[in-house]
Structure formats: structure tokens, C-alpha cells
Image: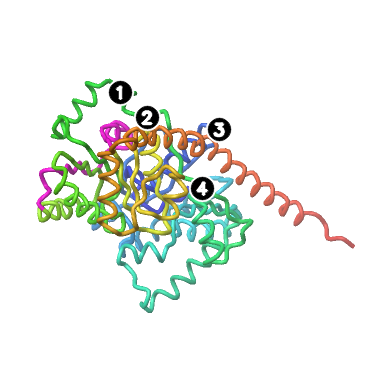
Amino acid sequence: MIAPTSFFADYGCHVRILEEARTLQKLGHQVTIVTYHNGNDVPGLDIRRTLPVPWRGDYEVGSSRHKIGLDALLGVKTLGLLARQRFDVIHAHLHEGALIGLVLGKLFRIPVVFDFQGSLTEEMIDHHFLRRESLFYPPLRRLERWIDRTPPVVFTSSAHAERILVEQFGCPPAHVRVLPDCVNGDSFRPAAGYAPQELAALRAQLGIAEGRKLIVYLGLLAEYQGTGLLLQAMQRILAHHPDVSLLLMGFPGVQLYAGQAQALGIQHAVTFTGRVPYQEAPRYLALGDVAVAPKLSLTEGAGKLLNYMAVALPTVAFDTPVAREYLGLDGLLAVRGDVDSLAQQLTAALFPTGENAQAVRELGLRLRRRALQHFGWDQAGQTIVAAYGELLARAAGRSLSTSMPAPR
């Protein structure tokens, strides 16, 4: 696997890479992950890192000019691995990984699978790294189109992403396979699966007073994730319901958003944890009454929704195709980018009245059932392995045909 990121860093695409690797190991495969020099090692995974760069020690999140040098080092590291060891398949994550994989895969005659996790150019725009009117936009869009169309198999995290690849980038439909983000339902479980005193102790440790309703968020803190809009929605909620708290779990930008919370006058009701280790995430989420995912991106996945669902939390999200795909009919959807709508949906979930009270309680349980039935890693692993087998059989057929004498 080629992972052009600071693997492992407890969020988003890192979780997908981690769980795919673990699932493949469980199925008997040997997996080597080549990634940037920084990141956390994971017991049981073969992780190979690039040479360090002294001027860049932080995690790499999103678009950055520093990634150009890091990706060059990643290409060199991958070249060295392929020259020394025999690999059957290159499983490339993100567009940078796919570009490296396609070039080196052709050189070493190894089939490449591309794990698509959102549009390259749209992510750059979301991160304010690129503007549509920029001179760089057309060539980058053409490069993205070539990367998307070249691999024989492209995995997407949603059916919406599949449509984007086919309709906007001209990918052959037969090349695209939907491989949804998944969740481990044994690890991510409802609050009832914990001893009450364990959760009470964690709540006290975080400084959240007993009896306060709690909204939980776990993921990156960034504008395209809707973090600023969530804080504004929290201000509106507190104006009518002062007994609500928000647990914001994630990074980077903690200081930035803590400053925004203070400017909004809600710092007393918002707890910032910084990075929460992935293995601790289920316990932290189990503290919540409601979960929220105000992501604005229209092309990226939203794996955090599945974690919320598995914990049986009523879940509020902005109305996007991916949110609808994951949550089905049981999501509480706010108008995308609308602070008032977000506040209204959160309030309705926190303080249901009449018949709605029972409906909200049942909502979380239905979401957990949906997560377990449709988004399990074992099924995803079989999909990955089937694609590998198909590519290897195709490669073996080509090799056989080239070795046979030409017909007379």
C-alpha cells in the first residue's frame, strides 16, 4: 500500500487504510505500507517510512506545498522497496499515491488498484490551496482525470463518488467499484456496553458536568469540516438551552477554534481534547447524547458517520449525498452550510418532545443496525481480494499470451 500521508494519525483516510490492512491480514495476506516519515507506528503492521525532513515534523493534513517534496521521497522509497522485494499488487491511496503507483507499477509490471477518497482538485479548493480561476487549475484537473481513468480498478468510498468518477472524469464504469468506509461494530458499541462508572470517570476527567446534554464530534478541525459553523450553531443552542456541552475531539487548529469559541462566548460549554487515539475513540463517543458531522465537502467520504452509527447515537449532518448514503432514512439532515438549520436539528435531537422522544431513542438503534448490516469490514475485505484476484489473473493471461509463439 502507498499512503501519501502521515500514517497513522487517528482520522479519516488513516482509519480506512488501517482497517483495510488489518482485514487483509486477517484474510491471510501480507501487507506492507509505505508512508511519510512522521506518524504513529501501529503494532502488527509492516510500515516503511521515507527519509525524514528536518523542516517538517508535524502531521500532514490536507493540501500543502510541503507534500511535493514528501511525495518525491515517497516515490523514491517505493522504488527501493519494489526493487528489493516482490509484490503482487500495488494498492495506492489518494491521487498522489496513485500517481506514484501507476508510474512504478508500469516499470515493474505490477497491477495497481487506486483507492479514491475524494477529488484532488476539489480538496485543494476546500483547503483554499487552489482557486478555480487559477492558471494551475486546468492542468491539475487534467492530471486528476488521467490518474482517475488509468487504473484498471478504482475503489470509491461511496456510490456518489462512483458517479463523480464516471460522469465528471470519464472513468469506464467497469473499472469503478464501490468499497464503502466500514466500522468495527465490536469496538464501536453503545454506552450500555460500558460500566457506568467508567463513563462517569471519563466525563469527570474531561470536566463535563453531570446532567448536561452532550454533543460529540470526532474528526479533523477545519472549515471544510464545518467546525466554525458548528461553534456558531452551539452559540444559538446555548441561548435557549444553557445545559448543553460540546465535546470537540480532533486536530489541528485547536487553538484557532478555541479562540473562536471564546469570541462567541461559549468557551465554558466546549471541551477540546486534541487528538484522541483511535482505540480510545469508541469510549469517548459513548459519552454523547447526539453526534454531529457538519462536513461541507461534496466529494470526500465521511467515515465518522459510521462510527457514530455503530455507537447508536442519533446523528446530525449536513445534507450531502454521502451523508444520505450512509445514514439512509434515519439521519437528521440540516441544510448544507446553514447554521440555523444545524442548530435546529441538534436541538430537536437533544430535546425531543411528545412522540418524537421515543422516535429519537429508536433512531440510534436503527442506525447501529444499519451500520452492522451494510458496513462491515469482513465484506469489504472480500471485495478487495476479489479485485486483486481479477487483476492477477488478467496479468497472468497477458504474460502467457506474450510467451506463446505467434500464430502462423
Q: Does 136 sit left or right of 169 as displayed? A: left
Identify which residue is drawn at 26% across, 41% down: 216
Residue 285 in the magenta stretch? The answer is yes
SS at circle 1: loop
Q: Tell me whether circle 2 and circle 1 mark residues in contact (CB < 8 Å).
A: yes
Which region is colored magenta?
A: 265-289
Identify which residue is drawn at 73% across, 51% down: 397
SS at circle 2: loop
Circle 4 residue: 84
Sequence-first disc among 2 and 4: 4
Q: How many marks?
A: 4
Circle 3 residue: 28
Circle 2 residue: 189
Sequence-first disc among 2 and 1: 2
Q: Quadrant of the C terminus?
A: bottom right
Distance between the alpha carbons at the discs numbered 4 and 3: 22 Å
Q: Does 130 sit left or right of 381 as displayed? A: left
Front position among marks 1 and 3: 1
Q: Tell me whether circle 1 and circle 4 mark residues in contact (CB < 8 Å).
A: no
Q: Amino acid at mark 1?
A: Tyr
Distance between the alpha carbons at the discs numbered 2 and 1: 9 Å
Sequence-first disc among 1 and 4: 4
Residue at the front extreme, as displayed: 354
Neighbours of disc 2 within 10 Å: few (<14), some (14-19), many (20+): many
Front position among marks 4 and 3: 3
In the image, residue 136 lies at what x, y percent? Answer: 39, 75
